[in-house]
Structure formats: C-alpha cells, structure tokens
Image (cartoon, rainbow, N blue to C red):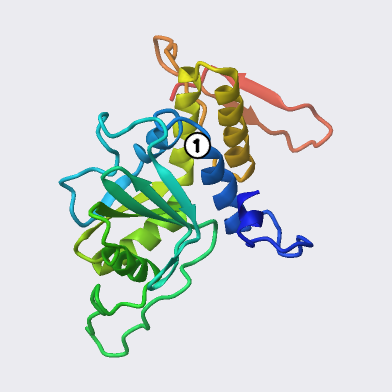
Amino acid sequence: MIAEIHNKISRTGSNLHDRLENQLTGDFFGTLRYLPFTLGLLPVLEKARWMSGPDSQPLVPPSQEASEYSHRLRFWPRLPNGEIDVLLRMPARTCGIEVKYYSPISSDDPASTDEGGAQPGAETSKHQLARYARSLCRLRDGRSKYLLLVATRSDGQAIAEGARDRIAAGVAFWFLSWEDSLQALRESLPRSKRTWQRRILRDLIRLLERKGFDPFRSFAITNPTVLPGPAYPFVLTWSCDWTAPVRVQQGVPL
C-alpha cells in the first residue's frame, strides 16, 4: 500500500514482482510504524551493527527517548544527492535507511586504472551510500545523523565493507541484515500483549519468511549418548556371483 501511494507501483501493476524493493520497503517499514516503537522498530534496530563513523551515540535511543509513537517515517524523500528509501526521525536522531533486496547499489566510483590508485574520498565519492551520507549531513535539524543499510547478510556485508571508508565523517554508518530483522520480530512476538499487535508481527514474520530470509538452521544433537568400548564398523563382502546375496561381516575392529 505504501509503495502504491508513493507511485512506486504502476496503476496496472506491470512493475510488480516478488523482488521489487519498493514493495518490500513499504510492506516492512510501513507496517512497523503502526506498532509501538519498543515493540516494532526498536528490537529491529537493536540487531544492527556499527560499521564506521561516530559511535559515541548508538543507533538505538535510550529509554527516555524511546516513547512509543514519537518517531516519524518518511518514504522516498528527495535529498540533495538522491532519493533514499526511508527517513526515520527520532527525538535526537535522524536515520536514513537504504533497502536492498538482491540488487546492487545504483552508483559507484569507477575502478582505478592506476596501480595503487586511491578511491575517491567521502566528499567526492559517487557511491550511492556516500551520496546519501552527504545529504544527511546537510540536514540542519540539530539531530545526530545515521545511515542504515538493510540487505541480506551475504550481499549487504560486501556492500557495507565497500562503503565504510567513503561515508562522511559526521554520519554513523550501520548495517542490518534481513535475517536478523526476522529474528528480532520473532523475539518481539512473545512480548506483544494485544491481539492486533500479535497479528501485525505474525504477518511481518510470514512476509520475511516468504522472501527467503529465514537462515538455514542445522539439526542440533543434544546430550548425545556415547557407547563405551571400541567401535566396530560393518564391512561389506561382495561375491563375484551377482546372483548371490550380499554378506555382511561384523566384528572387525578399527
């Protein structure tokens, strides 16, 4: 709904498919804004990891700032250096959020042809995240500035590592994986006390699961039983006569 309101989906739906980032952005963050901050956005933001920039103030606000509906979300606002997906305003923090869903960044610096050539700095870089960081610096709202990349673990980590040295010095750069976001919602579900809250959280969990953000969980063997004594494998003895049955000999020590 949010993506359609902001004209990110055509009236005919011709640009709508399972991997549409704008649809995912609107579905996820547009739904989170209906939940109290401490039940929706806060546990999700707590899963983010700091990558570069000022770290004296964490991305997650202290409890005295985390009132339930004091935060504001703007979708696809036009900034001086481009259009970021979400602009999150908290009482003392402004956080630009860039969402990726199996797609690369939209712009980057050209590869240097000179051996040992240095990459452009934060003030001149054409990297998509570097441009957004400069835009955040130009917002004169008296708040601390943050830039958050939301992507899959595999793709997002590579993008974040490539951008961390090109983020403006005044912006704290953080990375949040979709997989950790899903885990945060699962942890938040038991703390929801109202039926409508649980319904919203369950829908968001199903959405991220359907998108493939549920990491593979291997089988865990708890309290394995180890039998005493030497181990004796089974040894197969084959007969040259293919019509004869296979004989299994047991009792040959390792």
User: Residue 16: which quarter of the image?
Assistant: bottom right
* View extreme (left): residue: 56
The residue depicted at 62 percent of the width and 39 percent of the height is 207
Pick the residue in front: 214 or 168: 168
Q: Position of residue 101 (x, y in %)?
A: 54, 56
Q: Position of residue 29 (x, y in %)?
A: 51, 45
The residue depicted at 64 percent of the width and 55 percent of the height is 5
Compared across the picture, whether 206 is left or right of 229 comes to right
Q: Position of residue 94 (x, y in %)?
A: 32, 52
Can you see residue 3?
A: yes
* View extreme (right): residue: 243
Pick the residue in front: 113 or 73: 73
Q: Is residue 220 above or below residue 154?
A: above
Residue type, numbered disc 1: Leu
Which residue carries the number 1 mark?
182
Give the secondary structure at mark 1: helix
Pick the residue in front: 123 or 156: 123
